[in-house]
């Protein structure tokens, strides 16, 4: 990933920003924070929160651009302004939504969740953590937009994915459905691949209401 110079240079302070945010909210993370105190804490780490926003925005824009022009495009944007708008929209869940537990911005929970696992995260640790958080938000935005265009497809796809993830016969690796390692040869032979599942979701006949039956019907068509 290549970030613009104006963003890449200050990102060297990510570890310091994470530490300051974590230390500022640490004494109050066990319960709801009164609004005035919360405002003071956020003002205290305003520069650090701005740095995280700039970093997350750059990551979101990078992720959206890949999805726009990549093989599996989830967006249909004609210009950079729409990409920028989508990046801002994806960031609303991190910087515009508050935790129901403490009232803090969601990004503070992202900071705390990493610090709980790693008391002294380094730059690369933080970047990977933020990229994962941002990618989730971009994926959610893409799914929301797709659901607006074709809600039935999204509903069916979620059911099929839920079945595959919970099944002992299948594993989902980077959007590719594979036989489980301990699957019997018979299960492997009847393994439906991603193309069959997609075809099943778009089939003209009514889908079975039972999701396992739907996946098994796809394998039976082979």
Image (tube, rainbow, N blue to C red):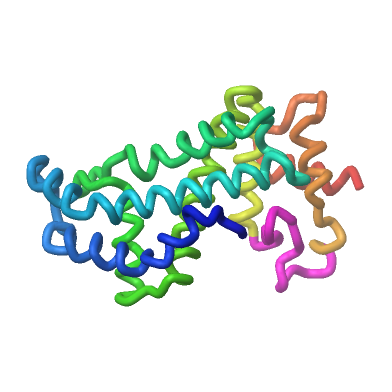
Given residues 14 and 198, the one toward you in this image is: 14
Q: Residue at x 60, y 43 (%)?
A: 64
Q: Residue 3, position in %: x, y?
A: 56, 56
Q: Residue 113, position in %: x, y?
A: 33, 62
Given residues 107 and 17, the one toward you in this image is: 17
Q: Residue at x 11, y 40 (%)?
A: 35
Q: Residue 57, position in %: x, y?
A: 47, 46
Residue 194 vertical position relative to residue 12 in the rendered view, above or below: above
**Quadrant occupied by the N terminus:** bottom right
Give the residues drawn in magenta, as a range: 168-186
Q: Residue at x 71, y 66 (%)?
A: 180
Given residues 220 and 165, the one toward you in this image is: 165
Q: Residue 134, position in %: x, y?
A: 48, 50
Q: Residue at x 23, y 64 (%)?
A: 20
- The number of discs equals 0
Residue 97 vertical position relative to residue 190 in the rendered view, above or below: above
Q: Is residue 102 left or right of residue 160?
A: left
């Amino acid at each position: 990933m290549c970030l613009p110079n104006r963003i890449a240079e200050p990102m060297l302070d990510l570890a310091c920003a994470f530490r300051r945010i974590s230390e500022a909210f640490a004494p109050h993370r066990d319960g709801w924070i009164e609004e005035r105190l919360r405002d003071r804490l956020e003002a205290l780490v305003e520069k650090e929160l701005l740095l995280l926003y700039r970093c997350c925005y750059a990551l979101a824009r990078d992720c959206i651009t890949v999805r726009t022009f990549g093989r599996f495009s989830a967006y249909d944007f004609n210009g950079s302004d729409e990409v920028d708008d989508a990046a801002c929209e994806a960031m609303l869940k991190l910087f515009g939504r508050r935790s129901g537990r403490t009232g803090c911005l969601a990004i503070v929970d992202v900071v705390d969740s990493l610090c709980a696992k790693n008391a002294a995260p380094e730059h690369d640790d933080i970047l990977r953590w933020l990229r994962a958080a941002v990618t989730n938000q971009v994926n959610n935005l893409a799914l929301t937009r797709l659901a607006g265009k074709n809600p039935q497809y999204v509903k069916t796809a979620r059911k099929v994915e839920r079945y595959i993830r919970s099944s002992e016969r299948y594993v989902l690796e980077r959007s590719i459905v594979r036989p489980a390692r301990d699957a019997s040869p018979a299960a492997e032979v009847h393994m439906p691949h991603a193309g069959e599942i997609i075809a099943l979701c778009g089939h003209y006949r009514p889908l079975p209401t039972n999701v396992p039956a739907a996946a098994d019907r796809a394998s039976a068509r082979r």
